[in-house]
Image (tube, rainbow, N blue to C red):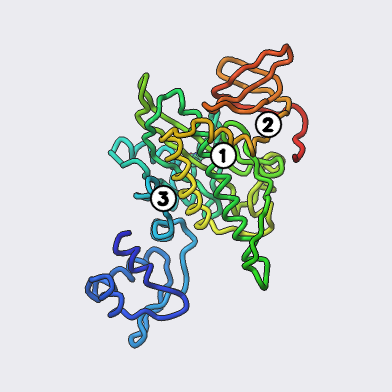
Amino acid sequence: MNTEHKVLAELTEDRYSSGEAISQKLNITRSAVWKHIVKLRERGYVIEALPRNGYRLIGRPDKLLPAEITPLIHAQVIGGHIVHFEKTGSTADDARKLIDEGAPEGTVVIADEQTQGRGRMGRTWQTPAGKAIALSVILHPRVSPSRISLLSLATALAVKNALVAVLSVTRESQSGEGGSEEIHVDPHISLKWPNDIYVGGKKLGGVLLEMAAELDRVQWAIASIGLNVNNQVQGTGLKNIATSLLEELGHEVSRRDLVVALLDELDSVYRRFNLEVDPGAISHEFEKSDMLQGHKVEVDTPAGFVTGVASGIDADGRLRIRESGGGVKLLFSGEATLSGAWSPP
Ligand code: BTN
């Protein structure tokens, strides 16, 4: 945490914190405290300052600022450095530039709005201002390039775990009196190989994994996540195929809480991925939410279309397809489409 984050951490909504107390605790002068208060106000924090009482936080900006996220994450590798843009073309492109500038592993680029967002297979990706999540993480995986497709499954799994964690808490805090009751929710989040996040048959978010590798070494990877949170998908051309948390739940969800959970979950699954202690574990966990399992699918792969019944995922993250002639194909990458309507499990 830098000093500005530490000053922010000293401010609360329910009481005043004196400038003297903050300066002593952080070992900085009172005028330095004041300078940080001014900076925080410039960033959109509403801070009351009363000569006798001190400072009180009245409002936070609805932006995914590092000061909002850094103090809350527990991640070890991911999020040590967070770069925030109110508006950018694409966080994935920004991350690529940061790699060339020597940004360390775990650097996160977050934007409140993207104007040139990119999806998989050359598609575009919408990130309307202040409503969704768009972030990219710089990684230097210590695995052979043949294992890298598993990283995109691992990232999707982290998104699912983060959603389940945050939505459980959201339901809990909305349950009225006695809201501390533990509620296990099943928001029907499923994963579509290799890395799409679905709710009730509609796409909620996706992962874009880009990398550069030599024959036996991955130079860098950028794991990017796009998630529809408080945006309306109804009314856009995507209404039958995509959805948002707002549309599914009927209420807004804190983007800050989601980003914090996402970075923590991604950190945990990424460390497991790098260590390769139990090579099949990530695929196995993914399989538990695999919406293609047992369904007839058509997969558009770099080598052409493959059709058959989706029959699980192997330890390297490859989709297993049982063809009508009885043969089995293992697919590294591709875009799977269900033949026929999806029905909930
Ligand atoms: C998909 O097609 O499902 C993947 C979508 C990935 C979108 C994210 S949003 C953050 C990052 N920046 C981009 O331009 N794309 C990715």
Tell me the SS state at disc 3.
loop
Give whichever of discs 2 and 3 has the lower sequence position.
Answer: 3
Does residue 324 appear left or right of residue 330 in this picture?
Answer: right
The numbered disc on residue 206 is 1
Determine whether the beta carbon of the residue marked 2 sits less than 8 angstroms from the nearest atom of ligand 1.
no
Which quadrant of the structure image shows residue 293?
A: top right
- Residue at the location (34% across, 41% down)? 105
Residue 284 image position (x, y, % from top left):
58, 34
Determine whether the beta carbon of the residue marked 1 sits less than 8 angstroms from the nearest atom of ligand 1.
yes
Q: Amino acid at mark 1?
A: Gly
Q: Amino acid at mark 2?
A: Leu
Q: Which residue is mark 3?
A: 75
- Residue at the location (67% across, 50% down)? 187
**Is 69 placed above or below 313 here?**
below
Select label 3 or label 1 by which is in front: 3
Badge 3: residue crowd in 10 Å (few <14, some 14–19, many ≥20)? some
Q: Is residue 116 visible?
A: no
**Is 297 placed above or below 186 here?**
above
The numbered disc on residue 160 is none
Q: Nearer the viewer, residue 310 or 17?
A: 310
